[in-house]
Image (cartoon, grey):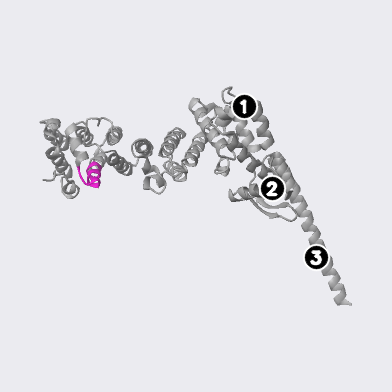
Amino acid sequence: MAESRPSSTLVNVAEHAELRLVQLLADSAPANLLGPSFASDCESRIASADAAGLIRTVLGNAGAMTSLFSIEPADEAVSAFSLLAALLDRESDPASARSAASEMADAAAGRGQSKNAAYDASKGASMLCALYNLRSDPSEKCALLRKIVAHVSSTCPDLLQPGRPLGDALDSGNVTKMLEGWGVDRAEKRAVYRTAAEGVGKAGGEDAASRQQKFLLLLVGTYENSGEVDVEALGAAKDAAVGAVSDPVTLFDEQRGMLSLPAVVALGGSPSTKSLYELLRIIQEGKLDDFESFASSNPSAVTDAGLSRETCVRHMRLLSLCSLAAEHEEIPYSAIGSTLRVDDAEVESWVISAVSSGLLVAKMDQLQKVVLVERCVVRKFGQEQWGDLKGRLDAWKKNVGGILRGLEQSQATAQQVTTQ
């Protein structure tokens, strides 16, 4: 005979649902875990309209929690948990409601459930999500989001993969939009970004590094002045710097301005991270020659950061090509080969790599052995670059002026001919 499983179907549709839920949990709980007064204690809480007290009575009873996690199918267990969560709206004391919600979240995440043989981490994740959806206070939602990510990344990390509902919800742009909409302060944003970075890192996957890097950059960006930079900020900045050096191409646009972030700037002032900051500066703004010179003078700087020198050289070649393209509209193969330290026969493959990476738009004239640049990313845009842009605009203005004057002269000549 198949073992009978409790069902919460009646709980969801009947009047006095909380009483029926209590009865369901009591009837299904192991007798040795429930205790003789569970039902009467719950009824007393219900009679006195003590919603938080009722929730704590259920959470604190091993038998009731075993019964709750035994409910099948899983969505009915979540429905039963949601019924408890809905009672929080009846609690007149907001602080008590927040505290009870936090206790519910801890129970769903497995805290205090070590002896609960029926505890299921995936059910717990669904319960956490249900609780998150039922709460409206911004600070509560931040805390619940962090608990969801921490729990899922530790127990069922595949749920955080892109393509899964929770994984898609944990998109950096989506999370940023939610936090802005909630109007939470920078401290709460930092906590969420930090947990999200750790969570997507644990989730793994082929794009885990770039997903994690996006959250690290958001986290580092919350430190808006040097006075806010603390040990945690320096740690996050160090991780973000290592991420930017290990892959400066995939998130080129997001990482381009990170040298100006106060937490990143602070890396340059610490003896333990000064070499990492200099390496980041070269990756962001320098050329291959700069990297080779730095790596020769600081042989351990690359390996200490857990980076591969070969990988760094490959990225520096691509970025050096972009710098060259920003300076010249027509580049001889020989100039590219010299800058990248490769044979002329390899030039075309590096141009193709730069184009396929989205860093460069160009054409190759194989007969003339030149690269014709149409567009390229700008690695650095400071006073010097503003001056160069002004020079180009002035030249364009002069050329356009010459064309207009030529048209005016042509029109005047044509009118004279017509008059004659």
The question of residue 177 being in magenta is answered with: no
The three-letter amino acid code for the residue at tag 3 is Leu
The three-letter amino acid code for the residue at tag 2 is Ala
Q: Position of residue 275 (x, y in %)?
A: 60, 27
Q: Residues within 10 Å of mark 2 (few under 14, many from 20)?
A: few
**Residue at image point 47% right, 45% down:** 173
- Along the polypeptide, which appears first: circle 2 or circle 3? 2
417 over 92 or under it: above or below: below
Q: Quadrant of residue 50?
A: top left
Query: Seen in the image, is 309 located left or right of residue 407?
Result: left
Residue stretch in magenta: 71-82
Query: Seen in the image, is 204 located left or right of residue 397?
Result: left
Q: Quadrant of residue 343?
A: top right
**Residue at image point 59% right, 26% down:** 300
The three-letter amino acid code for the residue at tag 1 is Pro
Which image quarter holds the N terminus? top left
Q: Which residue is mark 1?
A: 299
The question of residue 73 being in magenta is answered with: yes
Q: Position of residue 281 (x, y in %)?
A: 63, 33
CA gap between label 1 and label 3 equals: 62 Å
CA gap between label 2 and label 1 equals: 30 Å
Q: Which residue is mark 2?
A: 345
Q: Secondary structure at mark 2?
A: helix
**Residue 49 visible in the picture:** no
CA gap between label 2 and label 3 equals: 46 Å
Q: Secondary structure at mark 1?
A: helix
Q: Which residue is mark 3?
A: 407
